[in-house]
Image: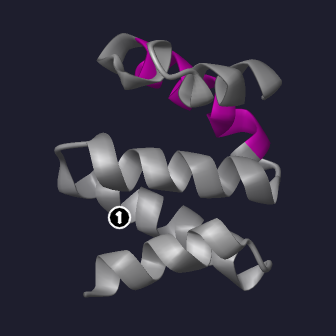
Amino acid sequence: MRVALWLLDSPRLGQTPGVKRIAGNLLKQPARKGCVQAQSRLGQLLCRDCGNTRDRRIGYELLRQAARAGDRSAQQELERLSR
């Protein structure tokens, strides 16, 4: 998970679609296991960068789970999406 977060937070690497895909794949397993930080980051990634409705719905649900657990960035992202 640390590698995925490092990739996403890297100013140069974090903007490329291939790197986002790799980071998303690395975040899936921890998010499924209930890691709030992974749920938040993967949810943001799916809601912001995916073009299909199914992935956005999954991302929104991950953000909701993370927000319920108290993750502030997930709460802010949900507020932004609901406008």
Q: Position of residue 81 (x, y in %)?
A: 32, 76
User: Is 81 placed above or below 45 here?
Assistant: below
Question: Does the image show residue 34?
Answer: no
Answer left or right for 8 relative to 39.
Answer: left
Q: Which residues are magenta?
A: 19-30
Q: Amino acid at mark 1?
A: Arg
Question: Does the image show residue 47?
Answer: yes
Q: Quadrant of residue 28?
A: top right
Q: Residue at x 46, y 71 (%)?
A: 77
Which residue is more in the foreground, 77 or 66?
77
User: Is 5 placed above or below 32 here?
Assistant: above
Query: Which secondary structure dominates the residues rendered in magenta?
Result: helix
Q: SS at mark 1?
A: helix
Q: Quadrant of residue 75?
A: bottom right
On whether residue 26 falls in the magenta region, the answer is yes
Residue for badge 1: 57
Q: Residue at x 67, y 24 (%)?
A: 4
Q: Residue at x 29, y 42 (%)?
A: 49
Which residue is more in the foreground, 58 or 79?
79
On whether residue 27 falls in the magenta region, the answer is yes
Q: Residue at x 68, y 30 (%)?
A: 5
Quadrant in which the C terminus appears: bottom left
Quadrant in which the N terminus appears: top right
